[in-house]
Amino acid sequence: MRVAFFTDSFRKNLGGLTRAAISLHDRLTRAGYAVRVFTLPQTGGPLHPGDVRLVRAIPLRPVPGLPPDSHLAWDYREVRRELAAWRPDVVHLHTLLPVSWLGLLAARSLGIPVVATYHANVRSAAMVLPAGKAVAAVVGPLVRTFYNRCDAVIAPSRFAAGELRRFGVRRPVEVISNGIDLDRFAPTQPVRPEEASGAAGPAEPRWPERPVTVLFAGRLSPDKGVDSLLEALEIALREEPGLRARIAGDGPLAGAVRRALAPHIAAGRVTLCGHVPWEAMPAEYGAADILLFPSRTETQGLAALEAMAAGLPVVAVRAGALPELVRDGESGITAAPGDAEALARAVLLLARDPDLRHRLGAGARAVAGEHEAGRVLEQVLALYARVAGARAGRGEVHRRGAA
């Protein structure tokens, strides 16, 4: 089977959407499938290895508020020519932006079946932009028109599927997780000094335990609940002197985060890690005890899922898709959106109760197992086969009718 991906980014360190597309690409290629990726020129870092085609595009550097390597794809003719020559069995769209529109229109003109994944919560993302209400008014018709032109749509959560239905998408929607490599994020067990030296020793370690560490991983932007993050950390750090915090991420609110937490940073209780490469994230999860994730806009929540695969209990808000992963009393603790006090109380409860922390961490690992990468690949391949078979069947019926 040949699959053509369309995605605006194909380098790992640009957030969950890109990580999800790259992870699926790698699973498909390891399984022996041919995947060709159509993406945009990117100046912020090297592209992920693969069969990559850069779609000709206009740089958008002068546009305020956009990342410096943003581009606007325009070369429809070349995209159509490439698809016609390579003739994939399925086109898989990963964004709602122009590069995927080119892929959608070209595939439809060539009779190639199209699957699209709804990765980003575009309604909530629009509302945090300048003139958000005006942008949100445009988003609904755009989403409806785009996804109703596809043969099938993947939603990574039940919440995302519901959002698509509320937008008016009537094409078949299948809930398929983005998946997680459980081995990559497997919890690491501490090695006792006597084990490292080969000497026999007591059953329990005798060295002091390290401080409990709470981690935030994600883009420092309004949609990730950074306001609640800062309030919750201020409360928790004030009430529990032994608590430590690490913030792994960068973004437009990085300066505000640094200013708000300056006293704790100076005291060595908060570490701002800045941008952490995707390859280094397993070590970040391994060094933490709790994930604090107050994002309100997740269509799945890959950072939460990765942390759970690493055995971390998660403190999150009851918004978006997060309650599907973070189940109260099973894999973490949730609070109402905007309730920083409740988030802080949950962090403190876990920090002070190691038995509860370990029990919820084990539950988190079990929930992550429901999203195991191999299971997800089977579901995606089954969907590809269905849409390819259905399109082939319609073509056969059409040919018979014309005979």
Image: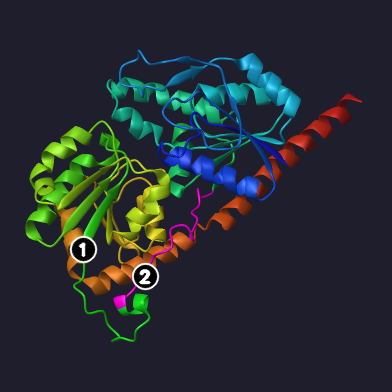
Quadrant of residue 350 within the rendered picture: bottom left
Residues packed near mark 1 inside 10 Å, few (<14), some (14 to 19) or many (20 plus): some
Provide the secondary structure element on which disc 2 rests: loop
Pointer 2: what residue?
A: 189
Indicate the amino acid at tag 2. Answer: Gln
Residue at position x 7%, y 45% in the image = 263
- For the residue carrying disc 2, how many other residues have a C-alpha within 10 Å: few (<14), some (14-19), or many (20+)? few
The residue that appears at 49% across and 43% down in the rendered structure is 20
- Please tell me which residue lies in front, 278 or 363: 278
Lateral position of residue 356 relative to residue 381, left or right: left
Disc 1 and disc 2: Cα gap in Å? 16 Å
Answer left or right for 155 relative to 136. Answer: right
Quarter-of-image position of residue 166:
top left
- Res 301 visible: no
The part of the chain drawn in magenta is 176-193
x and y percentages locating residue 224 in the rendered image: 29, 40
The mark that comes first in sequence, 1 or 2, is 2
272 drawn magenta: no
Quadrant where the image shows the N terminus: top right
Mark 1: secondary structure: loop
Residue ID for mark 1: 212
Residue 297 visible: yes
Q: Residue at x 17, y 68 (%)?
A: 352
Vertical side of 354 occupied by 243: above or below:
above
Q: Residue at x 47, y 24 (%)?
A: 142
Majority secondary structure of magenta residues: loop
Residue 113: mark = none
